[in-house]
Image (cartoon, helix red, strand yellow):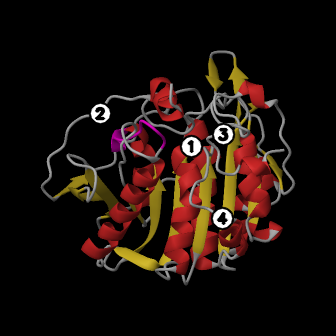
Amino acid sequence: MKPVALLCAVLLFACSKKNNTESATTTPYVDDDLAGPVSRPTSGYGKDGSYTVASISFASPTYSGKQVTVFYPKEATTACPVIFYSHPYGGEEASYNIGLYEFIAKKGYAVVFAPYPTTGVTVDSRYNTLWQSFKQAVTNYPNIIDTKKVGFMGHSFGGGASFALAYKAFTQEGWGQNGRFLFAMAQWYSYQLTDSMLNTFPANTKLITEVYNDDVTNDHRMAIDIFKRINIANAEKDYILVKKTELPNYTYTAEHDLPNTRSAYDAYDYYVIYRLLDAMIDYSFNGNAAAKNTCLGNGSAAQVTLPSYNGQALTPLEVTDSPTPQFLQSKYLFSCNSSDNPRINYCQ
């Protein structure tokens, strides 16, 4: 079985058909309880913003029958800094991680969600679908999207893809001249990415690489490879390991599918991803030093400490600038030393 088909079988999610007509909607935020006993943050980074979430969609330029969606703050009067999000295999519908997109818009920023097909096309075709979708969103909505402050964020396939996409945006299009960052989660293989590209990332790029201790899908070595070789100073990047927390009646998991709103929307989404992203945006786009202590704190208390429940603290994050693999490659469905990995020579 081909690797894409195999991963699809593991991660495939239901898809619903959408029409091709451009549409705009406004979604009032509903404060549903999170799963588990720990609530969302009520202050500081990770607290929900006050903007109303609006969205506008257009037909994907290359993926027939699918819609690219831009989420943004309804009350914004000028174009907003933007995050371009690349989803994992099978996460083609915005509903899979809608909590993340709404969090970004509520904080006053835009986010572009672009679906790509899970099966039946090449990796290069998927990369092209993401790229053409992001470009079209910028062209369509200059009143919503400000390309002077840009983040690229992705999970699994999308995490691996974000580096080549970001490099093209930063170096060919000049996006992010006033602020740039990458936030990669549970990375799959990275294609279209050369050593020369890694060596010439713009100096103002920041990076969070996040992996999950109980992930059995993607070998952490893929993330470690890019983290170590990208031309970003240690002071401007952090490698973060997330571990699960077992409470008497609920487990906060640290598996491959973190984060996703549909199956396990809980405090880990907020404290492990949204909180760090919120601070990364503030540091990258506004230069806020306090924000850096949370997102790129090199293991600071503000960065790694998670809340407690009935006296039991959630497992702290583990942060390093010199990551090493914790498990054998045989643990993973997609090992670093697979012939499908274009960077197989960089496995540890």
Position of 175 relative to 127 (above/below) = below
**Of callouts 3 and 2, the N-terminal one:** 2
**Of callouts 1 and 4, the N-terminal one:** 1
Residue at the disc numbered 4 = 194
Q: CA distance from mark 1 to mark 2?
A: 18 Å
Q: Which mark is residue 41?
A: none
Q: Amino acid at mark 3?
A: Ser
Q: Residues within 10 Å of mark 3 (few under 14, many from 20)?
A: few
Residue at the disc numbered 2 = 15
**Of callouts 3 and 4, the N-terminal one:** 4
Q: Amino acid at mark 4?
A: Thr
SS label for mark 4:
loop
- Range drawn in magenta: 88-95
Choose mark 4 or mark 2, whichever is in front.
4
Q: Position of residue 38 (x, y in %)?
A: 60, 33
Q: Amino acid at mark 1?
A: Ser
Q: Which mark is residue 156?
A: 1
Q: Position of residue 345 (x, y in %)?
A: 77, 50
Q: Is residue 220 left or right of residue 103?
A: right
Q: Nearer the viewer, residue 299 or 141?
A: 141
Can residue 69 be found in the magenta stretch? no
Residue at the disc numbered 3 = 339
